Each structure stands twice: as structure tokens, then as C-alpha cells.
Image (cartoon, grey):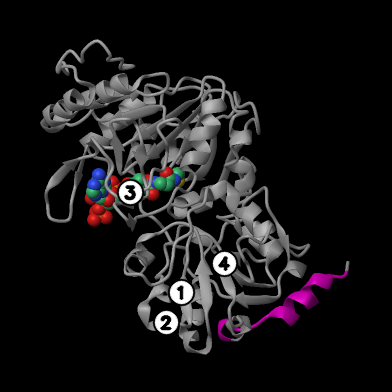
Amino acid sequence: MANYWKEEYLSKLRSAEEAVREIREGDTVILGHCIAEPKALVDAMVANAQQYHDVEVRHMFSLGGGEYAAPQFKGHLRANPFFVSANVRTSIAEGHGDFTPVFFHEVPKLIREKRIRCDVLMTQVTPPDKNGYCSLGTSVDYTLQALHSARTVIVQVNENLPWTMGNHVHVSEFDYIVEQTEPLYESAPPKIGEIETAIGRYCASLVEDGATLQLGIGAIPDAVVRCLGDRKDLGIHSEMISDGILDLCEKGVITGREKTLDKGEIVVTFLMGTRRLYDFVNHNPVVKVLPVDYVNNPLVIMQQRNMVSINAALKVDLMGQVSAESIGLKQFSGVGGQVDFVRGVAMSENGKAIIAMPSLARKKDGTTVSKIVPYLEEGEAVTTSRNDVDYIVTEYGIARMKGHSLKERAANLIQIAHPDFRDALGQEYERRFHEPWCCGDGGKALELVR
Ligand code: COA
């Protein structure tokens, strides 16, 4: 059989330096997401920065160097991400570049409708199979739509990228191909201390046999997973997975048998972890990596019965407003998929949307502050609104919000605040509601799940 695609593949081969010269004045360049960010192409673009005029670089979560956001590239390259990762945080806070708030599930639609420009997509792909198809590997999310919408598609073929199921792109869809195999970004499993373990136990107590889970990244989701070893037939329908779930898969706890949609399958839109995770998903028919406008779509999530989502927060005020993306006016991250899941789960039969966080945060100057606060700071973005929020968990317990009045919410939240801050929060309760706050027994309004 003739391998037509091979000729095409060879005709599109370029060096990274040649390929990035295709970026034009005023272009918007979207980078493949997270682990699929094409390091060799980004490095070549940054090296060529002085040749560009007015080029914008966009992405969601990024583990790369983020050099394109640096002030010295003013007028040439600037960052305008959908999520502020550590690599671009300082530049953006100092006014170099910009930030675009957007629900993760809406990004492909906005690209399709040209409300988010995508002139150039640069991403990693696997080497082609015998028919000329490649896998997008660790990130399908908006990357697939960007590939379909971009004027110019530049791919970095990396042999280390796992082949994941549920997505494929043909060599004919690329404009330029750069072969460069290099190690994938890895994010080491987080350290789980006593506080995370306590939070993990409370969250896990809300997970019944047969539940389907969405887990974010970090110590708390991993701590939850460690407490689920005795559950049966759990399922995964999650924006992302990391190494945390691998032990549960090996133990046979995650079967997906009770899932209402995509039965038996682990469905995600991206993944981020260590080589152990990338090897696990490689050609694994159980794991499907699908576009984010499916995975994170609240209308899809709602169809999973017993859906449980677990996400983090920077702080929660006494009404239950969740701040998860800015500290004051400083953009710290982004909404990501938090609200996609909170809303989808709210419509799921027996669904439970959990926001989990330690009761205290340690600031840079070494002082500790309560993450349960009377008010959000001036300029702080509300990520999950008080109308959307359901369960809040700290190491001191679980506070329910849905169906509860403002007084009940405040009382429940004070009960799970750090003991050193409960009196001050109690005084705020009394000032606000003109009635005594009963510490200890929680007062008449208290309703903790456990
Ligand atoms: N006041 C002041 N500073 C605070 C704070 C508070 N209440 N809470 C946290 N901080 C500081 C911490 O001290 C830490 O500072 P450092 O970077 O100097 O060490 C920093 O903020 C991050 O805190 P941490 O608890 O380590 O956060 P995290 O890395 O676990 O991320 C979120 C937490 C909320 C920012 C993150 O989960 C997020 O961006 N969520 C929104 C997106 C989302 O939920 N996506 C869904 C699924 S993937």
C-alpha cells in the first residue's frame, strides 16, 4: 500500500528556527496546553523575538519558562493567557501582557467563533502511526479546536509523548513539522501532610461506592484518593488526572462500571504528572483524552449520577463566596474548570461539589491568615459564587452551603475555621446579624455533615 502521507510528512519537515519564522506581525499564537507545550518551538520563538511585531501568546496552564512574557520583549511578544501560571505571574502583575478570564469549557467555542483569535497553533504530537495519524497525547482540551482553526499549524513531533485514545490528527492537518524528541515536563507528586490527610478524610467521607470523580491537582486531591482504597466501582470524569489515581486503578477500585456516561472509561481533557502516568495512559484503551467542550461541559457532567468534584480555593468569605484565582487585584491563576464542574455537579443526581482548602495560609512574610474570612479583599475575583457553592471542607470538617441561609452559612464556616480565628469571625457574625454567635456547640443554625 502506498504511504502517501509519508511524502507529505517529509515535505513539511522544518527546523524549529525555520518553522517559527512563519509567525507574522499581529499574530496570536496559541500554545498546546500544559505538558503538550512544545518547548523546542517556544524556545525558537523566543530566540526570534526581535523579528516579531505585536505577537500575542496564549495558553491555559503552563509549566514552561514563560520568557515571552518578559518586559524586554515589549512590542514583539506579550502573554495573554487564560490562566496565570507561576511562569508569567510577575510579568502580568507588573503590567506586561494581559489576562483573559474564561471558563475552560468555553475556550474551543470562542476559538471556533473567532472571538479568541488563533492564527498559529504550536503543539506537540506523537510520531504518526502507519496510516499517518498522530495523537495529541496529554492535552486535547482547546488544542484540537485551535489546530482546526489556526491559519498555520506547527507541530513538534516528540517520541516521549504518550499516545492517548479518543483523539487523533492526520499529518495532512499540519503545515510545518519539527522533529524534536525531548523529555516531557513532569510534576512531582505533592507532599501530603497531616492537614491534607485530615481534609482528604473529610472529602472522602462524601464519596460513595459507584461515585464518579473530578479531581484537581495538588496535595488535597491526592490525599482524598489515598482515603478511597476501600471504595467500589469509582469512575473518573475529570478535567485532568495526575499520578494520584494510579494506585486506585491498579487496585481495581476505579472500574467506571457505575458511570452513566462513558461507562468503564476514564475520561479527561488533559493530564499532568510523572513518567509513571504517561506510561499508564500510553495506548491505554481505558483512558480517553477528549476536548474540553465535552469533558468540562456542565451539560455533560450533569449526566453522570453521583458526580463528586473536588477543587481548591485561596479563601472563602462568610457568605460562601469562593476566591480561587486572585489575591486582591493580583491575578494568581484563573477559573480553569472549577465552575464548569461546580455547575455540572449541581445538576447531577446526588452530585456533590466540594471546595477543599486548609484553614490557614502562610503569607510570604511568615504570618498565617485564616482562609475563611469575613470579606473578600478589594478587587478580588469571585470564582465560585455564593449561589453555586455547595460543600466547603477544611481539616476541621465540612460546611454545607446550598439550601442554607446567610446566618447558617456563616455559622457553619466559623466551625471549620482555624480555632485561633473563630472568635474574631464570631464577632463579625454578631456585628452582621445582630445576634450572639454561640461558639463550641455551633449555635442553632449549625449543620455539619460530620
Ligand atoms: N491569603 C493570602 N495568600 C494566600 C491565601 C490567602 N487566603 N491562600 C493561599 N495564599 C498563597 C499561599 O501562601 C501561596 O503563596 P506562595 O505561592 O508564595 O507559596 C499561594 O497563595 C498558593 O497557595 P496554595 O495553597 O499553595 O495554592 P495551590 O497551589 O494549591 O492553588 C488555587 C490553589 C486555588 C490557586 C488553585 O487550585 C487554582 O488556581 N484554582 C482555580 C482553578 C481550578 O480550580 N481548576 C479546577 C481543576 S484543575
- At horizontal 60% and vertical 27% (from top left) the residue drawn is 259
First in sequence: mark 3 vs mark 1? 1
Q: Is residue 381 above or below residue 175?
A: above
The residue carrying pointer 1 sits among few (fewer than 14), some (14 to 19) or many (20 or more) residues within 10 Å by Cα, namely many
The amino acid at mark 3 is Glu
Q: Which residue is mark 2?
A: 73
Residue extending farthest to the front is 434
The amino acid at mark 4 is Ile
Position of residue 123 in the picture relative to residue 196 (left or right): right
Place of residue 39 in the rendered image (x, y in percent of width and height, measured from the top left): 49, 71
Q: Which residues lie in the magenta part? A: 2-17
Circle 1/circle 4 CB separation < 8 Å? no
Give the spatial CA distance, label 3 vs label 4.
27 Å
Position of residue 314 in the picture relative to residue 364 (left or right): right
Circle 3/circle 4 CB separation < 8 Å? no
Quadrant in the rendering for residue 319: top left
Q: Secondary structure at mark 4?
A: strand
| Residue 30 badge | 4
Give the spatial CA distance, label 3 vs label 1.
24 Å
First in sequence: mark 2 vs mark 3? 2
Give the spatial CA distance, label 4 vs label 2.
17 Å
Q: Secondary structure at mark 1?
A: strand
Residue 64 in sight in this render:
yes
Residue extending farthest to the right is 1
Residue extending farthest to the top is 444
Circle 2/circle 1 CB separation < 8 Å? yes
Give the spatial CA distance, label 1 vs label 4.
12 Å
Residue 11 part of the magenta segment: yes
